Amino acid sequence: MSQVPCVIGFGMSPWGSEWKLSARDLIAKAARETIKSAGIGMKEIEAIHIGAMTTGMFTGQENIGAYAADAMGIPGVPASRHEGACASASVAFNAACDDIASGRHKMVWSGGIEKMTDVSGDGATAALAAASEREFEADQGATFPLMYALMAKSHMAALGTTREMLTAVAVKNHRNASKNPHAQFQMEVTPKIVESSIMVADPLRLFDCSPITDGSAGLIVVSEDVAKSLGKPYVRVLGRALVSDQMFLHRRKVLHEMPGAVKATKHALDEAGKKITDMQAIELHDCFTIAELMLLEAMGLYEPGKAGPATVDGKTAIEGESPVNSSGGLKGKGHPVGATGAAQIGELFLQLTGTAPTERQIPKDPTVGMAMNVGGIGTMCGATVLEGVRK
Ligand code: COA
């Protein structure tokens, strides 16, 4: 009989410009935090699935599966590296869930790593661009800030989205990050700071962008028998989907829509037997402020053009009707691309088990939530629906 995968622990390394820590150190730190959270020993881990987007270009290091097993002090276990651009950790998580669901393993570490600050800013932009279509888009100068700027312009022209709405996303996510000791930017920002920051790609300014980040995160995924036997709170993976989409932005019918995210949401919710309005906590991929609005609409939580006004009205704040990115999101928490998806699921693990730090615990004590992790311009979308089991 197929097993329901469950998450029993979550841990992160420090996230930021971690110049004193190698990728190996970051993985080891995240792994130690993960087993501490789960209350297990490192040697109980039977397999490793790690997301890493482009470690070769960022650090020169490949063979990340074996590298992670060695960093964790458990060489000998099966260890695989997974890649799906900024959704790499979701690809890894799905493989870990398959290991559990099939009964192949009972306890698996699933996580992610990216060490992005060893290269210059231009080097990071070039490494990230490897996730977009190379020949006709990236090589013609289409960086990620530029492509999301085009989506923002299109969203603004078609749906009336305003500067104030983009600013509201940045202000909210920085406020949440100020309550997250693992976040890269533990500071609140005012609308004036956001709107006077330098222009990166019109209309996106510095505070509309997620930063360049070093970091690792991990989850312990087990069968429900194991989760129950530990007698601690855990989350059940009710539904999950990985959906790919066409690589070209210029072939997308409507620039500001993400068909892959629409499909991934539907598949994950159908598998879970839930509706989007059942989600009491959402972590989503705000790589740029416009992405948060586009995804809220792609996921069906708001009609097209309504996510911006809802954000301005505080509906997606921690204390609002639909809390989004209580962790601080990619904007405030940081975005080590290969690790982001694991930290999104990790934040939901904390929120849905009621074990988030008090200052950022969603006051309605959510039990069901969803993570939406997006690679590239929505070319790989990982959606996960989770349900907390509190003791
Ligand atoms: N938000 C807020 N502040 C930021 C920031 C961000 N996204 N990125 C950098 N900063 C701050 C730094 O902390 C630093 O502050 P300090 O001078 O007080 O120390 C200052 O801005 C300059 O930092 P620097 O690293 O030189 O910035 P940069 O100009 O090289 O890079 C971006 C800024 C926006 C271009 C870069 O963060 C970026 O490319 N982001 C997008 C990443 C991306 O595309 N990810 C994939 C998404 S699909």
Image: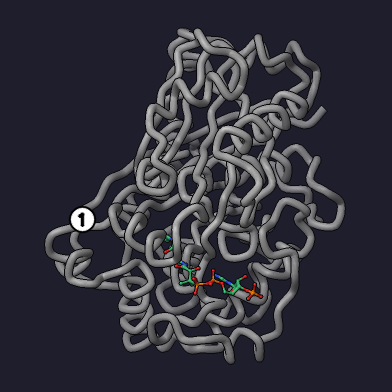
Residue drawn 36% across the image and 80% down it: 155
Residue type highlighted by circle 1: Met
Residue occupying the far right of the picture: 358
Image-based side of 110 in relation to 244, left or right: right
The answer to whether 331 is drawn above or below residue 167 in the figure is: above
Element assignment for label 1: loop
**Which colour style is shown?**
one colour
Seen in the picture, residue 359 relative to 348 is either above or below; the reply is below
Name the residue: 44% across, 24% down: 65
* Image position of 50 (left or right of 328): left
In this view, 353 is above or below 275 = above
- Residue drawn at x 66%, y 59% as measured from the top left: 184
Pinpoint residue 269: horizontal percent, then vertical percent.
Answer: 46, 43
Image: 280 above or below 148: above
Say if residue 1 shows up in the picture. no
Left of 10 or right of it: where is 208?
left
Mark 1 packing: few (<14 Cα in 10 Å), some, or many (20+)?
some
Q: Is mark 1 within 8 Å of ligand 1?
A: no
Q: Which of the two residues, 265 or 122, is positioned nearer the viewer here?
A: 122
The residue where tag 1 is placed is 247
Quarter of the C terminus within the rendering: top right
Residue 150 horizontal/vertical position (percent): 31, 78
The residue at the point 37 percent across, 54 percent down is: 261
Residue 38: image x %, image y %? 73, 24
